[in-house]
Image (tube, rainbow, N blue to C red):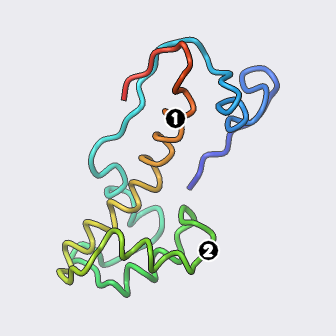
Amino acid sequence: MPLPACVDGVFLPKPVEEMLADKEVNKVPFIIGINNHEFGWSVQMLFNITGISEGMTREAATLALRDLPIMPPNPKAIPFILDEYLGDIDDPLEIRDRFLDLCGDTMFAIPALRIAKGHRGTICSYYS
């Protein structure tokens, strides 16, 4: 569920990715970070994934990831992503928890790291 930015020519003179690449950032301190389980509370409601309070199977996680708009556009990547997050576990509750971690990382952690990387080397202060 990406939140698209509006390039208005004033507040955002050009796309954020270009501004970060060119080190054109606001010269104010800011905080970048996330909490544990940022995504878990809303995944069921936002993406209509039901029945995960009892846990998930690897197959259910695969099907859920295919339908999530936050995942990479290449469905061939999903088995590799799941292998990284799930390993060889088979406990349904652990699979569910790691699935939620994957969703949280995709939605919050990865974008936060991209922003922090874009500010690296600038004169502004950031805290992560």
Q: Is residue 104 left or right of residue 116?
A: left
Q: CA distance from mark 2 to mark 1?
A: 25 Å
| Relative vertical location of residue 101 with respect to residue 86 in this rendering, above or below | above
Amino acid at circle 2: Asn
Percent x, y of residue 120: 52, 27
Q: Quadrant of the C terminus?
A: top left
**Camera-side mark, 2 or 1:** 1
User: What residue is pinned by disc 2?
Assistant: 74
Amino acid at circle 1: Lys
| Relative vertical location of residue 5 with respect to residue 19 in this rendering, above or below | below
Q: Which mark is residue 99?
A: none
Residue at 54% from the left image edge and 22% from the top image edge = 121
Q: Quadrant of the N terminus?
A: bottom right
User: What residue is pinned by disc 1?
Assistant: 117
Q: Is residue 121 left or right of residue 9?
A: left
All told, the count of numbered labels is 2
Residue at 29% from the left image edge and 73% from the top image edge = 86
Q: Secondary structure at mark 2?
A: loop
Percent x, y of residue 75: 57, 78
Percent x, y of residue 84: 36, 70
How many other residues sit within 10 Å of disc 1, few (<14), some (14-19) or many (≥20)? few
Q: Is residue 45 left or right of residue 37?
A: right
Percent x, y of residue 64: 45, 77
